[in-house]
Amino acid sequence: MAVTIKDVGKVANVSPSTVSRVLANHPKISEATKRKVREAMEKLGYHPNLQARSLVVKSTNTIGIVMPNSAELALENPFFPEVLRGISLKARESHYGIYLTTGASADEIYQEVVQMVQGKRVDGIILLYSKTNDYIMDYLLKEQFPFTVIGRPFINAERITHVDNDNIYITKQITDYLLQLGHTRIAFVGANMEMVYTIDRLQGLQQSLEQAGVSFDECLVIYDAQLKNRMKEQFSKLLQDPHPPTAIVAADDFVAIELISYAEDLNIAVPDDISIVGFNNIIIGKYIKPSLTTVEINIYQLGVEAAKYLLELLKEDDFLPRRITVPAKMIERKSCCRKIQ
Amino acid sequence: MAVTIKDVGKVANVSPSTVSRVLANHPKISEATKRKVREAMEKLGYHPNLQARSLVVKSTNTIGIVMPNSAELALENPFFPEVLRGISLKARESHYGIYLTTGASADEIYQEVVQMVQGKRVDGIILLYSKTNDYIMDYLLKEQFPFTVIGRPFINAERITHVDNDNIYITKQITDYLLQLGHTRIAFVGANMEMVYTIDRLQGLQQSLEQAGVSFDECLVIYDAQLKNRMKEQFSKLLQDPHPPTAIVAADDFVAIELISYAEDLNIAVPDDISIVGFNNIIIGKYIKPSLTTVEINIYQLGVEAAKYLLELLKEDDFLPRRITVPAKMIERKSCCRKIQ
DNA sequence: CTGAAAGCGCTTACAG
DNA sequence: CTGAAAGCGCTTACAG
């Protein structure tokens, strides 16, 4: 059915071995026979069967990407396509393909990863997120399977190559900024304590407050879990605190925009009554009113670096684990202002 | 190195053939030896090599997804993750994996598709978009390679299984709605004539106008190409028309939101001075002011159906091409109102 | 119910 | 510079 090296060998009057060698552009094959063989390929419309090659060379030239749980709406935000764009760039440069995980639950994802790894579907894996309690990472570590992580591994970080923003530092900067605007009651809304980046950001917040001698109030942290479809309620409750916050650090721009909308409904002015800052710098943040102060975390770059180092790791035997920090930067717009006394 | 069926055969005292058969849960193998073999697998941590299996059964159990050109920022919008969620669901149900195209240009994508197909990396393909001039579709058709399309194929639609909204109809409905609000000067902003869905939507607009005896003005169509970073300029130019539009159909919610923002800058009130309707029903549309009237196109469902029919197509030999229409529905919110005389 | 053999389409020492 | 042979890890007629 499909045309194989045998067929082109027959046409070119050489052995299959020779065909295989010109495929690899082996230096010891004469130009003459290379030409002859290539003509035959052309004529027959030959294309190598990648599966067969993979089987013998024990490498698939594809990298597996583990996406977050697709059941969650986390995917609505543009993190995913953007990081994929970055990964694609590097993968393409090295002629690697991309295989995707699709699981809707942590267990399903785990099963798929095992399949990828043991089924020899991919040469390496990029984990698109880092959770506190991740048996996928444990598994890959145990199998000594090549992988890199976007985010900070909660444990074994020194053994795992990962690329991340300095979430502690950038959130400290943001908080410093809010403090400097006179805010001392600063809430954190949308905290998902399963995600390591949340932990880091909260820590940055606390560090900043501590350094400024402002006490950190646990009540001002609104967790993701409490939020499920009840953000508005939680938000108005927050505002009824005897000492309500005058500034909010939102988990991401989506949360921020939602809060801004509720504020309007509740007759709270942003930024006059309450300052709000988001994360991720989604395009729309520029267009809403007030335009959103946020953090550019360079998602694309996170993808690029994660792929780049995975590929290096696949090439070198003596690759040492490392941490790559992608710069994040506050984008000051109009959703924060000086606290009004 | 890796454990193979030979190894488990040895441990279980059976031939490799038998191991292979219990792997396939072949009915003619006795329960006793099945148990024995499975124990051996367990003990050795055996996992089948999918590559090897694929090579002989000539099927990879993976579907290829052709994404739009990743160079464009089209990916910022949540269409992609959402459609992927739908495809994933069906793929997972049938134990299919997902292989992704990553090309940054049409040519690159074409090369990757050829690789997927000829390299036997995937069993079938889902095209995530439909363009007017698509040599990828021609190629797949010529190769008789199984594929489905999200969107209406511009040519050969009757030979290609595709899933789409009825873009003509829904846009006609939207336009009827605007007409009924008293608008007769209706612009269309962000038209990308390469995309078949744009063509259909424009057609729906025209049909509606025609039916209402309102003349269609070519000048009120603003093309994507003219828009590159100059939407604000184009928009204000549009408003300076002797007969400026009082309503706008935007190519998608992103464009709509951007327009709303510019309107504010230009001191034009939405919806009082100008009504705006978008497409896709992105989450944020609910939260901006004014909340966005838009069209729910059921992206997730588009993905589900595209995958479902691709899988059927792969199973049946006598599968007939068909068109699946996913319902779209206008979501009326606050960005449109009756024309003020 | 199970095994021996051939083969999927390629690569790669080994020889010459 | 090139070919014959073995082998990657599996499946599947064919036989018994």
Image (cartoon, coloured by chain):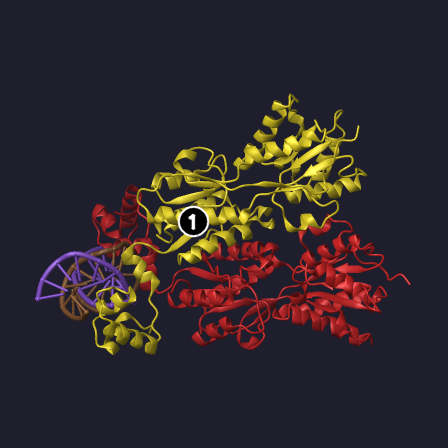
Chain colours: A yellow, B red, C purple, D brown
Residue displayed at 52% across by 46% down: A69
Q: Position of residue A6 (x, y in %)?
A: 25, 72
Q: Quadrant of the C terminus of chain A?
A: top right
Question: Whole-percent x and y of residue B108?
Answer: 47, 65
Q: Is residue A332 above or below residue B97?
A: above
- Name the residue nearer the viewer: B56 or A19: A19
Give the position of the N terminus of chain A as an image quadrant.
bottom left
Relative to residue B89, is residue B230 drawn left or right?
Answer: right
Please state which amino acid type lies under the numbered disc 1: Lys
Locate residue B216 relative to residue A57 in the image: left or right: right
> Horizontal placement of B186 versus A320: left or right?
right
Q: In the rendered image of this protein, does residue D1 appear above or below residue A79?
A: below
Q: Quadrant of residue B275?
A: bottom right
Q: Between B43 and A133, which is closer to the camera in this rendering?
A: A133
Q: Is residue B224 visible?
A: yes
Residue found at the very far right of the displayed protein = B341
